[in-house]
Image (spheres, rainbow, N blue to C red):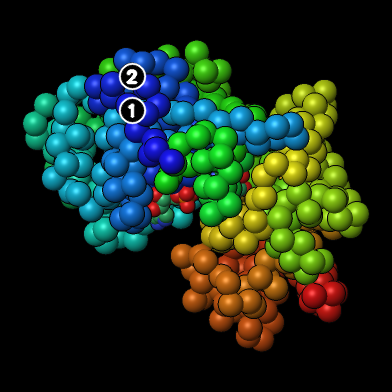
Amino acid sequence: MARLDRTSARARPAAPVRAVHLGLGAFHRAHQAVYTAADPDWGIAAYTFRNTELPGLLTEQEGLYSVQVRGDTAPRVEIVDSISRVHRGDDTERWLADLASPEVALVTLTITEAAYRAPDDLAGTALGRLLAGLRRRYETSRAPLSLVPCDNLPGNGAALRSALRSRAQRCGAEFRAWLDEQVSFVDTVVDRITPATTEQDRTTTARLLGLEDRAPVVTEPFGEWLLAGEFRLGRPAWERAGARFVDDLDAYEQRKLWFLNGAHSLLAYTGPALGCGTIDEAVRHPRLSEWVESWWDAAARHATLGPDDLLEYRRRLRRRFASRGLRHHLRQIAADGSQKLPARILPVLRAERRRGRLPGSAVAALAGWLLHLRTHQVRDPRAEELTALAHGPDAPRRALAALDEELAADDELVAAVEDRARELGAAR
Ligand SMILES: NC(=O)c1ccc[n+]([C@@H]2O[C@H](COP(=O)([O-])OP(=O)(O)OC[C@H]3O[C@@H](n4cnc5c(N)ncnc54)[C@H](O)[C@@H]3O)[C@@H](O)[C@H]2O)c1
Ligand SMILES: O=P(O)(O)OC[C@@H](O)[C@@H](O)[C@H](O)[C@H](O)CO
């Protein structure tokens, strides 16, 4: 079978690089790169963070790859041609040159939630690379730039600005003034469920495409991109692919993080105890689906958007989650819980406790998280500390305290988490 490249796919030549991406993984390929493909004047130079294999595979394919879209009907496959160059994250000279280039107008990022809280020593971190690139730009072209984080955290643009500003303290007042005046930070809400690609996905893609693609991604038909902020040197016409530019993202961000991601985390931690391995299996389990519905009821009591909007959102989520097209593994979603639960579950839990309610769904999510911390599959920047707490005395309270001291002082909540963890643990 012929290998996918610009000749075999009869694709256009690579577009000039005007955007850079850091953290090339499945999601960038299923989301931002697809939106950028709608504007042929914009090419992306994509950098992985740690992955050293993907740049070689994609470079052999001249940046091309396919997106297999799977819902409840027959899958379809599309070739995406917006990535013009692909580089390893440790190709520092290339990275610095791209960041310095006045032709480059924006940088998108998918670096995971954890990366926004880098340690003081930035060596080898995504923030460190970004700061080094910004300094090179300041020392050379001083052209404006827009940073567009696409990770699932509240106020991602503002979070990135504050993380970079605090790390720029030692970089000199003039650099800091340039950062304030010439670099804009765009807030985004991103949505398209994109599980890690499997060997089987590679095989079905080859069959559908009739070409060998060594870097395909599989995703759902739905996609959403909401953005708020300024683009100093222009941007691709992402609206051609459905992106929406709004003044205020808060209500949409809350809806996405609480309803979609909150339910994902709830299922990721409770599903394994009830014998489920993927989201579609979990939402078919009566007890888990009851928890999801009651989680959504709790979230709706505190959400900004009105009831009609939320009912429609829930209806759509039920369908997306139940789709058998995607096998979204709970263990992938369970990673980095210490970075995700504070944005996805705790705001609603706090609001409920203030009203004297004890939402069983949030209790279940925390109990499931505690059990998860007792397994050997914990991937979390705080894994060592958290697994020790989860195995030690007074585990529910101490693990909860690692997320929120105030909630950990709530005896009724802690007792409920302990009871539910015992019950879920026995069900395993
Ligand atoms: N997959 C989805 O459905 C989806 C949807 C919306 C948003 N996102 C966001 O995109 C991020 C990446 O998801 P993905 O599906 O591409 O995952 P992936 O595993 O395919 O790729 C993750 C990317 O992040 C990099 N990375 C991992 N740890 C990092 C760290 N500590 N610092 C910097 N970079 C790091 C990896 O090297 C890789 O390039 C998620 O964490 C999430 O914030 C994903
Ligand atoms: O990608 P993460 O690790 O932030 O979270 C896992 C999932 O909840 C997430 O990827 C969703 O699938 C996504 O946010 C849907 O748009």
For residue 103, above or below residue 64: above
Q: Position of residue 375 (x, y in %)?
A: 63, 76
The circle on residue 262 is none
In percent of the image, x 46 and y 29: which residue is there? 79
Q: Position of residue 347 (x, y in %)?
A: 67, 48
Question: Mark 1 near mark 2, Cβ–Cβ under 8 Å?
Answer: yes
Seen from this angle, which residue lies furthest bottom? 393
Q: Residues within 10 Å of mark 1 (few under 14, many from 20)?
A: some
Look at the numbered disc 2 and say if its residue's Cβ is closer than 8 Å to ligand 1. Answer: no
- Left/right placement of residue 262 relative to residue 148 reads right
* Of the image marks 1 and 2, the number of the one nearer the N terminus: 1
Question: Which residue type carries mark 2?
Answer: Arg
Helix, strand or loop at label 2? It is loop
- Left/right placement of residue 93 relative to residue 130 reads left
Q: Position of residue 112 (x, y in %)?
A: 46, 50
- Left/right placement of residue 317 relative to residue 24 reads right
> Which quarter of the figure has residue 225?
top right
Q: Which residue is mark 2?
A: 12
Question: Which residue type carries mark 1?
Answer: Arg
Q: Residues within 10 Å of mark 2 (few under 14, many from 20)?
A: few
Q: Exactly how many numbered labels are in the figure?
A: 2
Helix, strand or loop at label 1? It is loop
The circle on residue 6 is 1
In percent of the image, x 77 and y 62: which residue is there? 276
> Which quarter of the figure has residue 52?
bottom left
- Quadrant location of the C terminus in the rendered image: bottom right
